[in-house]
Amino acid sequence: MQQEVDATRIPELKHIVEQVLAEARRAGASQAEAAVSLQRGFTTAVRLGEVDTVEYQRDRGMGVTVYFGKAKGSASTADFSAEALHATVAKACAIARYTAEDEYAGLADPRDLAHEVPDLDLYHRWDLEPDQAVELARECEAAGLAVDRRLNNSEGASVGNHCGVRVHGNSLGFLQGYASSSHSVSCVLLAQQGEDMQRDYWYSSARDPGELEAAAAIGRRAGQNAVARLGARKLATRRAPVLYSPDMARSLFRSYIGAIRGASQYRKSSFLLDVAGSPVFPSFLQLEEKPHILKGMASSPFDAEGVATRDRHLVIDGVAQGYVLDSYSARRLGLRTTGNADGVHNLFVRSTAGAPSQPELLKQMGTGLLVTELMGQGVNGVTGDYSRGASGFWVENGAIAYPVHEITVAGNLKDMFRRIVAVGGDVDHRGGLFTGSVLIDDLTIAGE
């Protein structure tokens, strides 16, 4: 019987980290840190009722970073034998000896390390066998195809069941770990009417399988979304208000996080340089990071350096409060790490001006574009120039008039952030960035 990948493995992984750190000390490293992880799971995909794939995943890895003064070397391995651990540390040390010193290199400040590790309820086992997952995927897809006779094809339904455990330690005495899980159900369907063919999807993801949407409901939503796009038209180029659906609005705030990352700031490669203390958004907009949400998909008791995560306001009343930093970028900027070495942990977008529903936002917009899909990577992080392919629905008199496609939404993010006129209460709770629909006043929509 295979051993479970859960919190019972933490003592074993802590022992590996201790071995690695001891090897680094013996090799003469002045500082060292190591992380060990195990992952296990499977993904099942079904297309038109037939099993497409059943993929098993079983991964493990150990990464070590050593410092000889301010010179740094890193190496990794998937072999946990004593000989392999010794060889991996030796390789990291050899790299460090040939690396130029960097005055900002080194472990996190001891005062910033996580001395207490809260239980965030991140691990929930799903006792699902592959054949059960196949039936669940079939149920999901069948429910979607039954929505409308114009749904005549499918890119498949899939079920994912994954869990893992991670331990991090360093030569400053930090040694902690935790287990986590991630489960999902998704479906992608195609609708056809004459020569017009459209695709759309829906999915649900959660730490706790009991909090996933019902498989049939996911399939039906995917089918409804695909059918709604039939008859899509092109638009003539114009300027108009744009309403981003919640799952598309996330990308706007991801761009903001990218612009205030420490690396973007010290490299002078951000369109929001030295923005701390300055207004970036309208005065009603608030951004808050909450890393300790129970069962949160982006929750974590500490970051990739062992630094304690904590609640913080990134934006208050539209004003940027600071940056997203790891220890290295913080030193480069003369600041203190914010515990974001592995990204932002649960970002909440809120408005003090109310939380209207999407229908209310459509009425507020009057005439404009509702964006439900974005394509391409047309965001310049240095200048803020924004140009992305899009599709969605044209809105007239506050109501959806018809679907549209093959258009481009363009502007500059610095201006777009300031032109946000409302944030909806229709929050999408999937993932680690929580926002409702976002209405922006007057953007360029390029079409025919």
Image: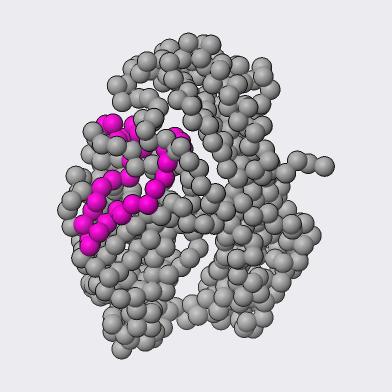
From the viewer's perspective, tell me whether residue 117 is left or right of residue 252.
right
Residue at 61%, 16% in the rendered image? 86
**Colour pattern:** one colour
- Front in this rendered view, residue 390 or 124: 124
Q: Relative to 108, say whether 355 is above or below.
A: below
> What percent of the width, then of the height, locates residue 257?
33, 51
From the viewer's perspective, tell me whether residue 277 is left or right of residue 356.
left
Q: How many marks?
A: 0
Q: Does the magenta run of residues contain 14?
A: no
Residue at 50%, 43% in the rendered image? 117
> What percent of the width, then of the height, locates residue 417?
25, 62
Residue at 24%, 51% in the rendered image? 321
- Front in this rendered view, residue 382 or 208: 208
- Asked whether the viewer can see residue 110, the reply is yes
Residue at 34%, 83% in the rendered image? 360
> What percent of the width, then of the height, locates residue 185?
62, 63
Q: Quadrant of residue 143?
A: bottom right
Q: Quadrant of the C terminus?
A: bottom left
Q: Does the magenta run of residues contain 326?
A: yes
Q: Quadrant of the N terminus?
A: top right
Magenta range is 303-332
> What percent of the width, then of the height, locates residue 169?
52, 30
